[in-house]
Structures are given as C-alpha cells and as structure tokens.
C-alpha cells in the first residue's frame, strides 16, 4: 500500500508492477528534466566527477572553490572552520 496526497491522504492499493511503473516513470521524468536543464551533469562537471569525461581533472571544482573564497562572508566561514573529532 502507498499513500497519495491529493486534498488529503488516502490509502490505495497498487500492484508491484504499478509501483515499479511509478518509479520508472519518475526516473524518466528526471532524466528528461536533466536533458532540458542539465543541473546534475553540471554538478558532476563542477566537482570533477563527470563519468563521461575523458579526463578526471578537478580544475572546475578548484575554480569553484576559488570563486567561493572571493566572497568575504564565505572566506570568513572557510577561515574559521575547525576540525571536530567524530569519535572519542
């Protein structure tokens, strides 16, 4: 069972096949959106993690970090970072 939001929550029963179709349709919508507006691909490029790139350069990510450091507030945040131990 899944819950669908319309004007209120209601319980409906769907088959496993319908649920898989919902997921596949959603993936198709996300992929189409990324074709029209490549937000995800741009993020991968920026971080140097584009799996389709022939080079694995972090140059775009380094440029992004340098650009952040030009902002006075972000620079202050970067300068004031402190490492915190995650375990005792």
Image (cartoon, rainbow, N blue to C red):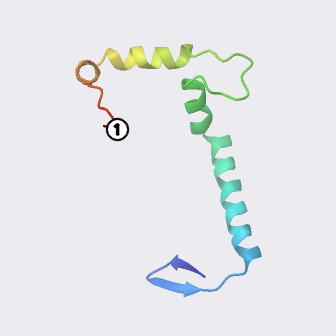
Quarter of the picture containing the N terminus is: bottom right
Q: Position of residue 6 (x, y in %)?
A: 49, 79
Q: Secondary structure at mark 1?
A: loop
Where residue 42 sits, quadrant-wise, is: top right
Q: Position of residue 83 (x, y in %)?
A: 30, 26
Say whether residue 17 is left or right of residue 37.
Answer: right
Q: Residues within 10 Å of mark 1 (few under 14, many from 20)?
A: few
Outermost residue, front side: 88
Count of picture labels: 1
Of residues 2 and 40, which is closer to you in this image? 2
Does residue 61 sit above or below 88 in this rendering? above
Say whether residue 17 is left or right of residue 60.
Answer: right
Q: Position of residue 18 (x, y in %)?
A: 73, 75
Does residue 87 sit above or below 47 in this rendering? below
Residue visible at 59% across and 22% down? 48
Quarter of the picture containing the C terminus is: top left
Say whether residue 48 is left or right of residue 35.
Answer: left
Does residue 86 sit above or below 74 in this rendering? below
Q: Which residue is mark 1?
A: 87
Q: Position of residue 14 (x, y in %)?
A: 68, 82
Residue visible at 54% across and 86% down? 11
Where residue 81 sits, quadrant-wise, is: top left
Of residues 84 and 66, which is closer to you in this image? 84
Residue visible at 62% across and 27% down? 49
Residue visible at 59% across and 86% down? 12
């Amino acid at each position: 069972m899944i819950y669908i939001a319309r004007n209120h929550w209601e319980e409906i029963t769907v088959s496993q096949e319908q649920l898989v179709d919902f997921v596949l349709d959603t993936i198709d919508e996300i992929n189409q959106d990324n074709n029209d507006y490549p937000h995800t691909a741009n993020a991968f490029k920026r971080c140097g993690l584009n799996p389709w790139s022939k080079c694995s350069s972090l140059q775009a990510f380094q440029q992004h970090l340098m650009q952040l450091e030009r902002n006075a507030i972000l620079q202050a945040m970067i300068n004031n970072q402190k490492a915190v131990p995650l375990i005792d």
